[in-house]
Image (cartoon, grey):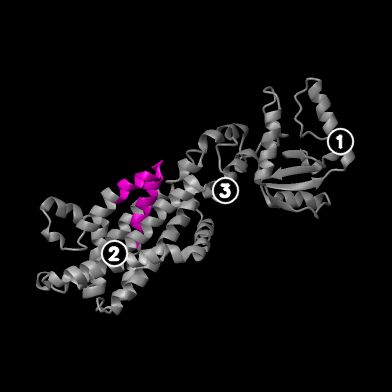
Amino acid sequence: MRHSSHPRRLIAATLPKYVVELDLPASEATVAGNKAAGNKAAGNAVAENTVAGSTVPAWAGERERLRVGNRLLVFGDSVADLTRDLAAAGAGDHLVRPASLQDALHALDRREETTPADPAPVTPAAPPGPGTGRRGAGDRQGARHRTRRALPAPSPALARRIWWRDFTLFRKSYRTTIVPNFFEPVFSLAAMGIGLGFYVDGAAIGSSYASFVAPGLLAVTAMNGAVFEVTYNVFVRLRHARSYDAAVTSPVEPPDIALGELMWALTRCLVYTGVYLAIVAALGYAPASTAPLAVPALLPLGLVFACAGLIFTGTVRAINAYSYFYTLVLTPLTLLSGVFFPTKRLPPVLRAVAEVSPLHHGVELSRALVITGDLPAAAGHLGWLVALSLVLLGPALYSLQRHLCA
């Protein structure tokens, strides 16, 4: 049980949802402990959390309870029920709180100390009535086998915590991490668009070669800005730094981590494309008035490759495996998706493959917004990218599940 769940599910499989702490006088707690020890020595399978009758309030007699030192923990499934019983007993000054991981571990410790003849070390509550939502003993015993199949929905609030962590680290290291990603597309534009473009006849493509290449490299920038973050960076945090092992000891679960990393990948995608587009516009290669729309419009392209990269990260065991991903997937897509030459020049088979690739749709979307201002054409490519990103989003959110679930 200890190694089969995340904190929230381990608590739910072990204890009711809420608890109130009652202070026991030291003498009574000692008597209770001695009584429990004496019963165990006499052969009676009495759990160590059994307390003397005088120390248990009448209202707590039918509830699960656990003695920890000089404290008596009384559990319930709702705040309202516990609060009402406390008020009726004149003990309204006690606070009701959610059951914690520490409470669950104490309960598990008590269970491990009991003999096999006593499978219920925590004092059992009354059988639940219909519709109460309480887990039965059989449910709790089966929870161990259900945790691997349980797929909790990611929490946007918890994912935002992961995003904020990445942003905090980025603020400390942006000088060494962000500048190289800006230079790469600018150097490519200078070498291919301006340098090689001097020898290319622009009549064949309807514009100067630099104007043709610039929006294509904008799509490549969106792809690279997203995919780099969810490959090498996530792998290091997952396998080497073990940052996520610490995260899942909190209420954060693997889908929350995956969603937070995807959010951060899109943030970097947005920053990189925005800065690169500003450089392209300053050089005069973004004549259309719709050019600023290209930055948010390319976010689905970034999401497609971020999901693909995260899914790949969830399958690899060695960092060297990324050589296959970049060499056999990203490089051919960059060369054959219409970034540097029209895809109609390709052989029919390669052309068919290139034109269904997400990068090709991103390149055409970028050209439609940056060069021609053709909004209907841009909408078609955008719809295709949104649909593909939704298909990949589900597997990506649960791609880290097997690594962070023992």
- Identify residue type, mark 3: Ala
Mark 1 / mark 3, whichever is N-terminal: 1
User: In what element is the residue under mark 2?
Assistant: helix
Task: Determine which residue is flagged by label 2.
Answer: 219
- Asked whether, in this view, residue 368 is left or right of residue 174, the answer is left
Residue mark closest to the camera, 2 vs 1: 2
The kind of residue on which mark 1 rests is Thr
Q: Which residues are magenta?
A: 300-326
The disc, 2 or 3, on the residue closer to the chain's N-terminal end is 2
Query: Is 130 situated above or below 301?
Result: above
Nearest the eye: 197 or 203: 197
Q: Please state if 146 lies on the left or on the right of 128 as rendered.
A: left
Residue 246 has which mark? Answer: 3
4 is within the stretch colored magenta: no
Q: Classify mark 3: residues with Cα within 10 Å, few (<14), some (14-19) or many (20+).
A: few
Residue, x 36% and y 72% (percent of image)? 275
Position above or below: 305 against 30: below
In this view, 145 is above or below 6: above
Point 49% across, 52% down: residue = 257
In the picture as drawn, the residue positioned furthest to the top comes out as 43
Q: Position of residue 197 (x, y in %)?
A: 17, 70
Which residue is nearer to you in this view: 131 or 62? 62
Tell me the SS state at disc 1: helix
Out of 250 and 207, give the one closest to the viewer. 207
Q: Main secondary structure of the magenta part?
A: helix
**Which residue is pictured at 23% across the width and 67% down the height?**
191
- In 3D space, how far apart are the residues under numbered discs 2 and 1 (Cα atoms)? 71 Å
Q: CA distance from mark 2 to mark 3?
A: 35 Å
Residue located at (57% from left, 43% from top) = 9
In percent of width and height, residue 368 lies at 23, 70
Mark 2 or mark 1: which comes first in sequence?
A: 1
Q: Dot 1 corresponds to which residue?
A: 30
